[in-house]
Amino acid sequence: MKEKTLYVVIAGCGAVGGRIAGHLSSMGHSVVVIDRDEKAFNNLPWEYSGFKIRGDVAEIENLKMAKLKNADAFLALTDDDNTNFMVTQVAKKIYNVPMVLARVNDPSNLKLFEEAGVLVVSPVILTVQFILSFFLGEDAERKRKV
Amino acid sequence: MKVILVGEGKLVYHLARSLLSKGYNVTIVSKNREFCEDISKTLKLTVVNGDPTKIGVLESAEPTKEDILVALTQRDQDNLMVCQLARNMFTMGRVFSLVNDPDNLEIFKKLGFVYSISTTEILASMVEQKISLEDIINLIPVEEGKISILEVDIKQGSPMIGKRLGEVGFPKGALIGSIIRQGNVLIPHGGTVLEEGDRLLIISLAEVQPEVLKFLKIEE
């Protein structure tokens, strides 16, 4: 059974943004990626069939062009927390996008994003948790042997 | 009470200088090392060198509830982050921000930062209304710019000279609050006759402002 096609806008087409865009696009969702650096689009896999907008995401004009108001989800995946914070707020407060997620690079910013009602993913915390999982919990010993 | 200025460049320098001359304590937080060194040599103030969008750096500026913070960097996302930290982490009540891209004003206001100013927007709207700047001495936006107070001189050749206020048909939504005539302040009424050289203090709704300026023949 095919799931509903979602309209997803992604800010930042780096190693993370490019891969997510590729996956979502091959899952059949409509995707728009925005990045100010043309070269960033090299991170998209060849099968990517969505749209690309070259421009600074911090300019609302570019978010408007991406038709953010129609988006089911907005992902702020740039490597700059301040940019991610501002654009997620635009998505939430001005365009009422139902799902808004940000990559939070500096863990000390997590609280601020969460208080502002944004879903967060922290590469630092994930890395730490992954490594610690080899040392904590019931199956830690088994994991270490693999 | 102190004023914390965040950012660098001429704007920060001149604002710091002007605030110092009025007797305020000023602290500057800037990423730019060179700027920090320069300004600490020329002005008597506290300087914190570091990224102001990091809690730890901002904390070094010792913000308190009573202090005022003004975010003046070139990047709106940095200004917004500084404002958010100042309010949410340091419970500062008076947070001002420069908004570089006028399109970003909306999100600053939506997040409750009512003291956000876009100089671009102010200049753009002035140019748009083709205001000859010499005629407007002062323009103070009040309540997020919904209403403004204008100070305008009645120059030679104005069609309003010699007419009674009651008969000139001043636009609705604006009123002349007071007239300054040769250093004296008059509170006008319908029978007051305008003279050349009068300075008018006009209170006007934002949407009526272009009409008022047109009426005063300030528009070219």
Image (spheres, coloured by chain):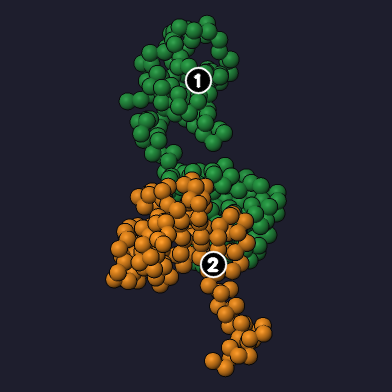
Chain colours: A orange, B green
Residue ID at (55%, 78%): A127
What is the residue that sits farthest to the front in this orientation? A1
Residue ID at (42%, 59%): A3
Between tags 1 and 2, which lies in front? 2
Q: Position of residue B188 (x, y in %)?
A: 55, 13
Find the distance from the CA under tag 1 to the CA under tag 2: 52 Å
**Which amino acid type is shown beneath numbered disc 1?**
Ala
Using the rendered image, report if marks 1 and 2 lie on a common chain.
no
Tell me which corner region of the image, top left, top right, bottom left or bottom right, holds residue A139: bottom right
Q: Is residue B47 above or below residue A142?
A: above
Kindly identify which chain the residue marked by label 2 belongs to: A
Residue ID at (57%, 93%): A145
User: Within 10 Å of the Cα at label 2, are there few (<14), some (14-19), or many (20+) other Cα atoms?
Assistant: some
Q: Position of residue A44 (x, y in %)?
A: 33, 69
For label 1, the SS is strand
Res B13 seen here: no
Question: Which residue corresponds to mark 1?
Answer: B174
**Which amino acid type is shown beneath numbered disc 2?**
Val
> How many numbered badges does the structure rendering display?
2
Q: Nearer the viewer, residue B141 or A39?
A: A39
Q: Nearer the viewer, residue B202 or A17?
A: A17
Residue ID at (41%, 39%): B123
- The circle drawn on residue A121 is 2
